[in-house]
Amino acid sequence: MSQEPEQKQQNSEIEFDDTDLVPRRRFLTLAGAGLLTIGFGSLAEGFVGGLSEPLNQQVESLIFKPQQPVPEFSISAIEPEKLIINSFRGTPAINPLAYRLTIDGEVNNPLSLSIEDLQKFPFTSMVISHVCVEGWAAIVQWGGLRLQDLLAIAKPAPQSKYVYFYSADGYYESWDLDSVIHPQTLMAYQKNGQPLTPENGAPLRLASPVKLGYKLSKWVTRIQLTSKLGEKRGYWEDLGYEWYAGL
């Protein structure tokens, strides 16, 4: 499955209670039984998930804490051999010298940034679990800049609620704005202490512990803010997968 089947400064005073350490997806499964079905796997499952998705989204949004960091792992826990590399339409050829990241849509200050521009932002590193809907996971170190820092400059319009990500290979995704501005949602250009490779999404990819892997787009070239979702919400979501896909 494409894009997904691959995928620090936090406030040390933030405390976690026991409920914060229980995966939200497990809570949804227990709480929802048949009603809150998570629509992954076959198209039949996707259809059922689509029927209940508005309720899923409401519950997941209620549980989600936009500014609370997810507990991280130590450097020694990194599992480089477990991160599977897949692609949507092969690895696109991107000239890093000509690359620009565009941020537009319902923002007050549209941006067009080079890799050099992006690397001037404060660097953030995290060691998190990259979780694939196919059933595997890998502990990875990602490094880059916080997406909330980019949006602070782009200045989203008050009505903005969603964010679309467009990739050089034609892949597309959309997120809720709260998840986008989570302090551990990064635009990453480093993996496991080394520059990101093209196969892993260079020059720039999404990385976050709050979403399943298929939400973590590689080769991102455009970020668009909007007040509402269009008919297309994401490559896999449009085939029946859950839209929110929170962890």
Image: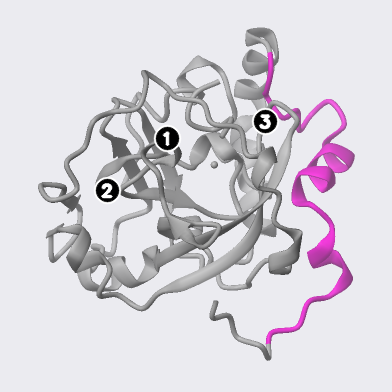
- At 72% across and 40% down in the image, what residue appears? 137
Mark 1 crowd level (few <14, some 14–19, many ≥20, 10 Å Cα)? some
Q: State the image quarter where residue 212 is shown.
A: top right
Q: Amino acid at mark 2?
A: Ile
Please say if the residues under marks 2 and 1 sit with CB atoms less than 8 Å apart. no
Where residue 19 appears, as percent x and y from the top left, is 85, 65
Q: What is the three-letter code of the residue carrying label 1?
A: Glu
Does 177 appear above or below 220?
below
Q: Is residue 72 visible?
A: no
Query: Which element type, helix, strand or loop, lies under badge 3?
Result: loop
Label 3, label 1: how far apart the Cα atoms are: 20 Å
Return the mark for residue 133: 3
* Precedes in sequence: disc 3 or disc 1: 3
Question: Residue 223: which numbered mark, if any?
Answer: 2
Q: What whole-number distance in Å separates the C-alpha atoms at marks 2 and 1?
A: 21 Å
Q: Which residue is mark 1?
A: 199
Q: Are marks 3 and 1 in contact (CB under 8 Å)?
A: no
The span from disc 3 to disc 2 (Cα, nearest Å) is 24 Å
Q: What is the count of numbered marks?
A: 3
* Residue at x-position 56% and y-position 72%: 67
Would residue 208 be found to the left or right of residue 100 on screen?
Answer: right
The residue drawn where x is 23% and y is 62% is: 157
- Callout 1 secondary element: helix
Q: Secondary structure at mark 2?
A: strand
- Residue 223 seen: yes
